[in-house]
Image (cartoon, helix red, strand yellow):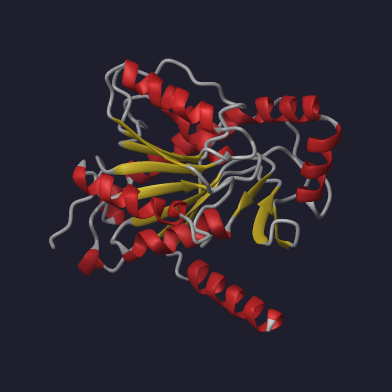
Amino acid sequence: MKNKAFLIFHLFLFVCIANAQVIVNLPHQKADNIKWIGEEKAFFSKRWNSEVVTNVSKPSIQIFSPNQEINTGTCVIIAPGGGLYALSMNNEGTLVADWLVKKGITAVILKYRLVPTYTDDGIKEYQKLSKENRSLLHENVQKTMPYSVSDALSAISYVRENASKLNIKPNKIGLMGFSAGGAVTVGASYNYTTINRPDFLVPVYPWLTEYPVREPQKDAPPLFIVCASNDPLKLALESTNLYKSWKAADLNVALHMYAKGGHGFGLKTKELPSDTWIDRFYEWALNEKLITTNN
């Protein structure tokens, strides 16, 4: 049964990726202070029970478009998490893209630059460092994060510049990030310009211990935050601080803090209220007219 389930899961993943209409390499600022060796690596991590990508040195996007009959014109750029050492491509990537596309939303999975890893198992490297040398882990993340954030802004620029070709509305482009990808999402909110300003932001259990909360820009976009009180990385308080910073600036913000859910729940089914967070996002986006339908 395990082998059968494994094959079905990978067939589903293949179908999702095969339906990506466009793969685009993004223009990016050169990182002179970071050295990557070799190409990015994609593999199934038994440790995380997920397809992952590591050692990303060149940012890119995969674009998934909905059927034209249901196309809302809204686009969501997805930044998977993984401690800035990896990208969790199923639970925080293709499954999210599939859900959005079925709702008529163009989904764009972003591969942003990651901390370099040097073996075939970057997850093992990350977990070893997180146990044995947290200060070096922090140093590596802090050095790489600015480039990851700039990659998210580059993705927004590309999608907006090609809105007509992609059948999306240039004023309906959002950024949704998970964990480290949530930190990248928040980072984008602090560093955008007129050209690459996101129209809405959805940080999901954002790793804000590595990207501390700041005062938002005066025209910061609407923000929808998701987290769980029992997050083992103790991210709940940081999410509430993020909420308060938007609220103090009289900006549009919503916070969904679940009692249980832990960390990394993404689109996993855990038989908990947190399972339906993406439905709550959809309802919020409809109410804010960030998504409009003909129904």
Q: Where residue 178 sits: x, y (%)? A: 52, 44
Locate the C terminus by quadrant: bottom left
Q: Nearer the viewer, residue 57 or 82?
A: 82
Could you tell me which residue is drawn at 53 percent across and 60 percent down? 270
- Tell me what residue is drawn at x 33 percent, y 30 percent: 195
Q: Is residue 47 visible?
A: yes
Residue 242 is drawn in which quadrant?
top left
Q: Is residue 74 above or below residue 2?
A: above
**Residue 170: x %, y % from top left:** 26, 42
Report the residue at 72% width, 51% height from top: 39
In the depicted view, which residue is nearer to us: 196 or 84? 84
Residue 79 location, x and y as percent? 51, 45
| Residue occupying the point 24% across, 44% down | 290
Q: Seen from this angle, which residue lies furthest left?
A: 294
Q: Quadrant of the N terminus?
A: bottom right
How many numbered marks have been drawn onto this rendered protein structure?
A: 0
Q: Is residue 178 depicted above or below 183 in this figure?
A: below
Q: Residue 226's quadrant in the figure? A: top left
Relative to residue 122, is residue 198 depicted above or below? above
Image coords of residue 156 (percent x, y): 39, 39
259 or 45, nearer to the observer: 259
* Left-right relation of 290 to 92: left
